[in-house]
Image (cartoon, coloured by chain):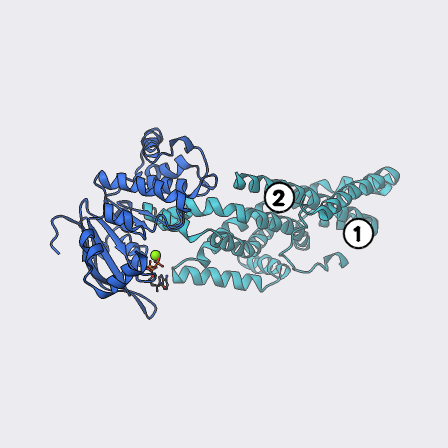
């Protein structure tokens, strides 16, 4: 696969949990502005792959380069790289002791030393964007799942990341709330954000993805454009997977 | 020294009155007002000797509080350091913290008190009260370490991951995300330890610190009014711990209200 302007390059990554190999020789390029949707059966290593990209799980061998910074380089400041990679979790993980606005402003104020007033104005704008500005003073526990997830997306955006990672952002939501979150993600995609998304929402994948990555047993077994992948998958395991879910 | 038969059983401070537990709530009232009633009765009906005894004690009460508060501050600092050590990925730090906790918890407080007082006394001359505070602080720090560890562990791992993914390092994550949430879990057991510590300060009377008990003993040995003196001392300890456990229960209900909002 040729890459014009890769912002993420993963080369021959291997990851073990004890004796169990969760990622096997994974290589992947993500270009600036590209939207990659990662799909695959449960336990295939999708979450692990995303988590290695911001070093929540260090890889055991191979190489991960984020916007020119090799995560495995000896003197690399991991925290700085992480600040450029936003992550949205299945379980939202909003800071429970902070209200919505403070969830967004905490990192910019503490890490970038952004003046509070400026951070608050900017973050209110982000909240407006995800339709949560009227809940700025609410605590996470007072919000629905869909609302929490929209706030979590805004919180990640508050650090102005270059890439956004989503690990099954709608899997913990009641069906009627899935739409509002996918909508926010679609807008983000249209604005040109680089995104890597693990999801079971095939409609979203079809509509938004530039590239579908299919994983099975810790390997990337197929990488294809959505039309091709959904109509004519090459890999037999991908064929079987699609038959099961569609 | 029959009053020193106290065992070194530190986990329990006092029963915390809880509105959800009407039995305990009523018991607290009976105990509290009963205690005040008895004290009032003794002072009014038998001013001689009880009024004389009680005049002798305020200095001791102040000392008891000083030792308690200073020790708890030291214990909180040591406990935080030890608790963080117990969950640290740094092998050496973890080992030192775990060893501290294991060793200290295996030695009775009274023995530690003697040890620090006499052993330390061979090297440097420390004032009695300082020796007492150091010993109490070190001992309770070990218990506090386990409280902190449990409190930190009770916070969902997702909170830490979200914080790391925003670019916070581990220390900042502790400071801004985990500890501010953990203190709600930690507060009740810390309050409990505080009460337990206050009671255990009675041990420091042995190493020449003039706390309530020692003041009482001084009075008793001069006047031979052992029974009367120790009765009053017991009632005073009871009053203090009952008030503290009430305060603690009020604080706890505030915290849980805040959490539910
Ligand atoms: N911390 C860990 N320790 C041990 N094994 C792990 C750990 N994390 C993941 N694994 C294992 O690695 C494999 C891949 O897990 P991963 O969570 O990446 O799968 P996934 O594709 O995201 O699955 P799902 O769709 O269920 O979320 C699984 O077999 C899982 O049990
Ligand atoms: Mg997963």
Q: How many marks?
A: 2
**Which chain's residue wears label 1?**
B
**Image quadrant in which the C terminus of chain A is located:** bottom left
Q: Residue at x 33, y 48 (%)?
A: B165
Instruction: Return the x and y of residue A219 as percentages of the image width and height.
Output: 24, 64
* Relative to B228, B174 lies left or right: left
The disc placed on residue A32 is none
Nearer the observer, B201 or B150: B150
Mark 2 lies on residue: B66
In the rendered view, would you say A154 is above or below A68? above
Badge 1 and badge 2 in a common chain: yes
Name the residue furthest bottom.
A19
Residue A26 in sight: yes
Q: Nearer the viewer, mark 1 or mark 2?
A: 2
Instruction: Return the x and y of residue B8 as percentages of the image width and height.
Output: 65, 60
Image quarter of residue A70:
bottom left
Q: Quadrant of ligand 2?
A: bottom left
Mark 1 lies on residue: B221
- Earlier-in-chain disc, 1 versus 2: 2
Residue A74 in sight: no
- Identify the chain drawn in cyan: B
Judge: label 2 CB < 8 Å from ligand 1. no
Instruction: Return the x and y of residue A43 as percentages of the image width and height.
Output: 34, 62
- The residues tagged by marks 1 and 2 sit, at their Cα atoms, a distance apart of 25 Å
SS type, badge 2: helix
């Amino acid at each position: 696969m040729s890459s014009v302007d890769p912002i993420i390059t993963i080369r021959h990554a291997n990851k073990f949990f004890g004796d169990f190999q969760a990622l096997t020789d994974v290589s992947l390029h993500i270009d600036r502005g590209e939207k990659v949707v990662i799909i695959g059966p449960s336990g295939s290593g999708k979450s692990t792959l995303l988590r290695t990209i911001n070093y929540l799980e260090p890889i055991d061998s191979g190489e991960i380069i984020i916007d020119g910074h090799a995560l495995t380089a000896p003197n690399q400041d991991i925290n700085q790289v992480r600040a450029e990679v936003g992550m949205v979790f299945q379980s939202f993980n909003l800071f429970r002791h902070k209200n919505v606005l403070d969830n967004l402003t905490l990192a910019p104020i503490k890490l970038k030393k952004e003046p509070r007033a400026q951070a608050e104005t900017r973050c209110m704008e982000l909240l407006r964007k995800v339709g949560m500005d009227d809940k700025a003073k609410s605590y996470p526990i007072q919000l629905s799942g869909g609302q929490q997830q929209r706030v979590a997306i805004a919180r990640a955006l508050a650090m102005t990341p270059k890439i956004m990672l989503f690990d099954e952002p709608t899997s913990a939501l009641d069906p009627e709330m899935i739409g509002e979150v996918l909508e926010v993600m679609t807008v983000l995609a249209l604005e040109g954000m680089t995104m890597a998304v693990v999801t079971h929402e095939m409609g979203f994948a079809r509509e938004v993805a530039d590239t579908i990555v299919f994983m099975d047993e810790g390997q990337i077994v197929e990488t294809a454009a959505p039309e091709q992948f959904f109509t004519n998958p090459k890999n037999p395991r991908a064929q079987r997977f699609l038959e099961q879910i569609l | 020294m029959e009053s020193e038969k106290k065992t070194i059983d530190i986990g329990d401070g006092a029963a915390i009155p809880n509105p959800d537990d009407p039995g305990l709530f009523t018991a607290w009232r009976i105990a509290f007002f009963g205690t005040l009633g008895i004290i009032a009765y003794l002072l009014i009906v038998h001013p001689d000797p009880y009024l004389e005894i009680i005049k002798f004690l305020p200095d001791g009460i102040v000392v008891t509080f000083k030792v308690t508060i200073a020790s708890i501050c030291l214990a909180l600092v040591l406990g935080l350091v030890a608790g963080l050590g117990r969950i640290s990925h740094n092998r050496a730090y973890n080992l030192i913290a775990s060893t501290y906790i294991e060793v200290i918890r295996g030695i009775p407080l009274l023995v530690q008190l003697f040890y620090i007082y006499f052993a330390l006394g061979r090297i440097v001359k420390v004032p009695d009260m300082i020796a007492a505070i150091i010993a109490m602080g070190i001992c309770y720090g070990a218990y506090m370490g386990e409280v902190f560890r449990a409190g930190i562990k009770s916070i969902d791992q997702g909170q830490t991951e979200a914080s790391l993914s925003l670019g916070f390092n581990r220390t900042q994550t502790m400071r801004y995300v985990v500890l501010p949430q953990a203190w709600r879990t930690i507060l009740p057991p810390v309050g409990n330890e505080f009460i337990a510590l206050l009671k255990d300060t009675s041990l420091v009377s042995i190493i020449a610190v003039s706390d309530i008990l020692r003041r009482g003993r001084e009075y008793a040995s001069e006047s031979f009014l052992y029974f009367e003196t120790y009765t009053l001392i017991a009632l005073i300890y009871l009053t203090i711990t009952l008030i503290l456990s009430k305060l603690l229960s009020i604080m706890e209900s505030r915290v849980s209200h805040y959490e539910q909002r």
